[in-house]
Image (spheres, helix red, strand yellow):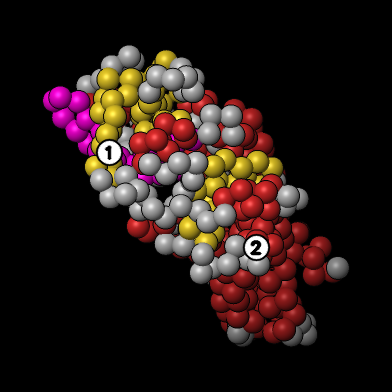
Amino acid sequence: MFLLKFALLNLTRNKRRSAITVLAVGIGLAALIFLWAFMDGSHEEQRENVTRLFTGHVQIHAAGFAKKMSAELVIPNRPEVLEKIKSNPRVVSLAPRSKCEALIGTTAQSKGIVLTGIDLDAEPLVTDIKKQVKEGEFLSGGEGKEILIGHVLAEKLEVGLGDKVVLMTQAMDGTLAGFAYRVKGVIHSGALPLDEYSAFISLASSQELLGIDSDIHEIAVRLRSRAEIEGFKKDMQTVLPSDSYEMLAWNEIVPEVDQWASYSNAIIQTMLIAVMAVIAVGVMNTILMSIFERTKEIGVMMALGTGPRQVVSMIFFETLVLEFIGIILGIGLAYLLVFHFQRVGILMTGFEDAFAESFMSPVVHPHLAFHRVLTSVKTLVLITSFISLYPAWRAAKMEPVKAIYHS
C-alpha cells in the first residue's frame, strides 16, 4: 500500500506528462478495441448475409452433387429424408430445391449462371430471396414460365421486366433442354454471386426443364442458430449416411468468408502488438523522465537503506498505475463508441462494389466481444510491464553517492 501511495505521489509531480501518457494509453487501447468490434461486426454480418441470402445454415445433397452439379444426382428417398429433417428439434424451416448450371441468353448475348428452382412457399422461410426482389414481383407460381434474375445480370443481358430470356441446360437424360422465360422480378441483394451469376425459377418449372419429375437436388435448412450446425450434423449422420448423402455447412459452401475473417484477425493482432509496443515505449519514456528528475531523491533513499528490489517495485508500481488509469479510460471510451455505432451503424460509402464480392454489408454495426477486450488489455499489460523493467533496472543500479551529487 505504501508503494502504491508513493507511486501516485510521484506521478502527480508532473501532472501534464502523466495525463498525456494516460491519454495515449487510453486512446490507443480504445482504438484497438473498437477496431476489433468493427471487424467482428462486419464478419458477423457477412456470415448472416451468406446464410440469409441463399445458403441457409446447412445444405443436403446426394453424394457428390456439390462438385458435379449433375441433373441425375437427385436426393435419394426424398419424402423420408424431408420428414426426418423436419422432425429434428434444431430445425426451424427447410426448403427443397433443384439446381443446375445453365446458359441464359437473348438473341444478342448469353451468360453462364447457376439456376435454382425454389419452392415458393418454403424458400422465404429459409432465405431472404423474396425480400431482395426490388423491381417487379416475386414468382407467382402460375402456369406461365417466370424467372428472377440479378440486376447485374439483367444489365449485362440488356433485359428488363417483362422481357424474355432463354434458358438452356442439360436434362437428366443427357439431352439439351431449353425454355423461354419472362423476367418477373429483378434482385438487388448487394452480393455479386446473386446479382450476376444466379437466376431463380419455380421448383415445378425447373423439374419440368430438367426432366426430374418430383425429385430435388438440394435441401436448404435453417436452424435455430449457427451454433446448432455441428449438433444437427451429428444428429443426422445415422439418418443420412455419407455414401449416399452429403451435408455441407454454410462455411463449407462459401469458405472464403471464414478465410477472410481469419486473415483480418491476423492483421489486427499484428497491429495490436505494434500499437501496444508504441504505447509501452511512451510509458517507458515517462517513467525514465520521472526517474531522471528524481535522481537525487532516489540516491538519498538508497543511502538510507532502500534496497534495489524496493526501487524496482516502486518504479513498477508507477507503471502499473499509469496502465490502470489508461485502461479504465480506454475501455470506457471503447464501449461508448461501440454502443453508439451499434445503434446508428457505420456507412462505408464508396466500398459498395468491393463489399458486394464478399457478402459484406455497406452499413457495419460493431459487435464487441469480451474476450477481445481481455486480449487487448492482457497484451498491453504484458508489453508495458516488460518494457518498464528497463527504467526500473536503471534506477536500481544507481550508486547512491553519484546519484545524490547528480546535477
Q: Is residue 241 visible?
A: yes
Tell us which disc is closer to us: 1 or 2.
1
Provide the secondary structure element on which disc 1 rests.
strand
Classify mark 2: helix, strand or loop.
loop
Q: Residues within 10 Å of mark 2 (few under 14, many from 20)?
A: some
* Sequence-first disc among 1 and 2: 1
Q: Cα distance, mark 1 to mark 2?
A: 34 Å
Please name the residue shown 72% across and 76% down the image. Answer: 313
Q: Position of residue 26 (x, y in %)?
A: 62, 50
**How far across and down, in percent of the image, does residue 343 sit?**
64, 30
Is 65 left, or right, of 23 in this rendering? left
Q: Amino acid at mark 1?
A: Ala
Q: Residue at x 32, y 35 (%)?
A: 196
Q: What residue span does the magenta drawing correspond to?
A: 97-118
- Name the residue carrying label 2: 239
Residue 177 is marked as 1
Does 47 lie within the magenta span?
no
Q: Amino acid at mark 2?
A: Val
Residue 104, quarter of the rendered image: top left
Name the outermost residue toward the right.
Answer: 1
Residue 89, placed above or below residue 176: below
Report the quarter where the N terminus lies.
bottom right
Is residue 286 positioned above or below 111 on the image?
below
Q: Is residue 217 left or right of residue 404?
A: left
Q: Residue 202 versus residue 275: which sits nearer the camera?
A: 202
Residue 45, image x and y in percent?
Answer: 54, 41
In the orientation shown, which residue stands out farthest toward the left? 108
396 relative to 17, above or below: below
